[in-house]
Image: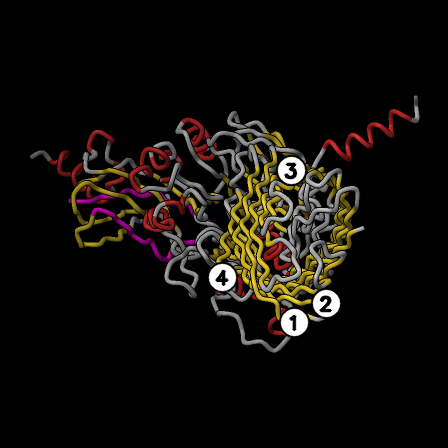
Amino acid sequence: MGCGFRRALVAAAAFPFLLAPAAFAQDLLRGPYLGKPDDADVAVVWDTAEPLDSRVDYARPGAPSAAEADPSFVTHHVVVLRGLAPGATYRYTISSGGAVLAPAAGFRTAGDASAESLAFAVIGDTSGGSVPRAIAQRLLASPAQLVLHTGDVVYPAGAQADYTSEFFAPMESLLAHAPVLPCIGNHDAATDAAAALLANFVLPQNGVAPEPRFYALRAADALFLVLDVETSSYGAGSAQYRWLESQLASSTARWKFVVLHEPLYSSSNPNTLARMILAPLFERYGVDIVFAGHEHLYERTVPIHDFTSSGPGVVYVTEGGGGAVLSDFSREDYSAYVASVYSYVIVTISGGRLTLTAHDLSGNVFDGTEISKGPPAPRRASAGEAAGAPPAPAGPRR
Amino acid sequence: MRRILPAAAAAAMAIAGLARAQEQLPTSSIAAPPAGGGLVRIDLGQYQTRSFVDRFGQTQRFPGLLTFEIATLEVSYGVSGRLSVGALLPYRRSTYEPPGVREYESDASPGAGAFAGVRLSPAGSASALFVRAGYFRARPGGDAVLTTSDELNRWTLSVEEARAPSPDRRWDWAARLDAQYSGRHEGEPRYLEGTLEARGGPRIASGRRLEAHLEAAASYRLASAAIEEDAFFHNRRSQRAYAGLVGSLGEAGRADPRWSLRLGATWDIAARNALSGSRFSLTLERRF
């Protein structure tokens, strides 16, 4: 064995993500893709045909590599990378059974609470292969650090058997580089109450329910609250409602976003029930934008307050143009823009300035808006607290 | 000619469409006016709820109280002993009081309708069988949080069989089947609704001029969407049943009582993708 070859082996062992694609094993069924177990950490996920161990080698550019490994033999591999630097770029490779399974990929972590800049994308109702594939390619070239999915990840019924062909394969180019954070859609819930979605995605725990059917994430100066209006109770007094109010009331984030599946305001098919229950809460605690899907179109409302479209209020965006058959609509008075179009949304935040742009599959911007605001107001007591009610379920302040 | 045409158009709209109220109250019935006579009925209803039961059976509570009130004036004329025609005009008020948001209130007429009814059973039989067909023209509404019109122009068909009034009746009973159809709404190709209602009970008091009955009432409604109280809640299949009591007071000893008063209180049960609450209703009928 020549000295040069030995050096190459050593280099490969130290930086397995530098290996060429030809060396990849055939055991990989799905992945790698990213998850968010909490605000700071990133999970790397992949599936193999045979039970194997798990290893992720990762490094920042120019920094020494690190590794996380799990010796247990599994087919669904979840490796959590902890202690990542906020706002940093990482490269990583996945290995099982001593073999590197996929080309090196990279991701960028969101900034911590002190960071003022953030970019994220919103997609929804992904179906049909070609549209999600096109959206994934566009998002890969975008500045989005995370992707919010407004639900109905997999048609027709959210079955595990359909996940690879309907979601993971078309979105493959994106999933290795940015975590996709879904909310539960009615199609996702059609099989075993969204069991496949919960099994596939690594999501933050909410602290009040055994599964993360609803959850919160803090990234930079933004709070994301992802709700479940399909399989969990969200009425006043429910665990989710109290959790939501607690999160909103205690948040120090300047920007607050809500993601749920069915739109509260829509020119196609609004969920009036959710509007009546949740909209007062969104308004009371200054939610900036509520993202929904369900209707297969793009829509942005004017700001809405007290159920009317006058003055400042909450903007409702429906982004359901991820590939399912487009919806008809009859434009409502509160609609600022509505179009049945395959699309995705990019939101960029810089301090107190937010820019939202809606893009077609060619990347062209067909709608947009800007919101400017000052620092967050001092925390107000919630209605329940003011009335002397027992405190809502506690969670980390975000 | 310029006067005749609008009048003819208005008359045609009034009688070409045929209808019953969108929200049939537990105290309502398909009463027929006497031949050559008229019947006026006033339905008053108040429905209150704090919760909606979703399709999984989970109760979703509203942060505030919802109150739906409706008043319907119905006037009909007996063309013959079997055929009657009429029109109705409901008026609705809806309020919602969530904390932290101004109280929301809206009131307006949901629309107007007209109907034609046929009595199928022969005179003098122990029970009366009616068929009524109608059309309800809804007023354009918009997308308010609580609409007073669901914007559904609907065709209706009702069949009711009831114990015929007689001097010696000790029991009252009635059963009715309603079907409604409307075309496209909220992105859905059609709206369908079917309701089966029944009530029955004994005479509890009688005198020379008045008699009173107390009936148990029950209903089951299945609809292709959760459209209730003129408000659209959801586009998925909806069901709701109720159980309750209806008390009635009317003239004693007449086969065709000139007036009657009914009071009802019902409570929803077995709701799925539907509101769940309670309703108080009052119906006053007067024959001329």
Let me know if residue B256 appears in the view: yes
Q: Is residue A199 left or right of residue A353?
A: left
Q: CA distance from mark 3 to mark 1?
A: 35 Å
Mark 3 / mark 1, whichever is N-terminal: 3
Q: Residue furthest top?
A: B1
- The chain to which mark 4 is attached is A
Q: Residues within 10 Å of mark 4 (few under 14, many from 20)?
A: many
Q: Which residue is mark 2?
A: B210
Q: Which residue is mark 1?
A: B205
Percent coordinates x, y for residue B194 in the rendering: 54, 44
Q: Is residue B36 left or right of residue A142?
A: right
Q: Amino acid at mark 2?
A: Leu
Q: Is residue A86 a member of the stretch shown in magenta? A: yes
Verify CB contact (< 8 Å) between mark 2 and mark 1.
yes
Q: Amino acid at mark 1?
A: Ala
The mark lying in front, picked from 3 and 1, is 1
Q: Is residue A76 a member of the stretch shown in magenta? A: yes
Q: Are marks 2 and 3 on the same chain?
A: yes
Q: CA distance from mark 2 to mark 1?
A: 8 Å
Q: Which residue is mark 4?
A: A240
Q: Are marks 3 and 1 on the same chain?
A: yes
- The chain to which mark 2 is attached is B
Span of residues in magenta: A75-97
Specify the quadrant of the image occupied by residue A12: top left
Q: Residues within 10 Å of mark 1 (few under 14, many from 20)?
A: few
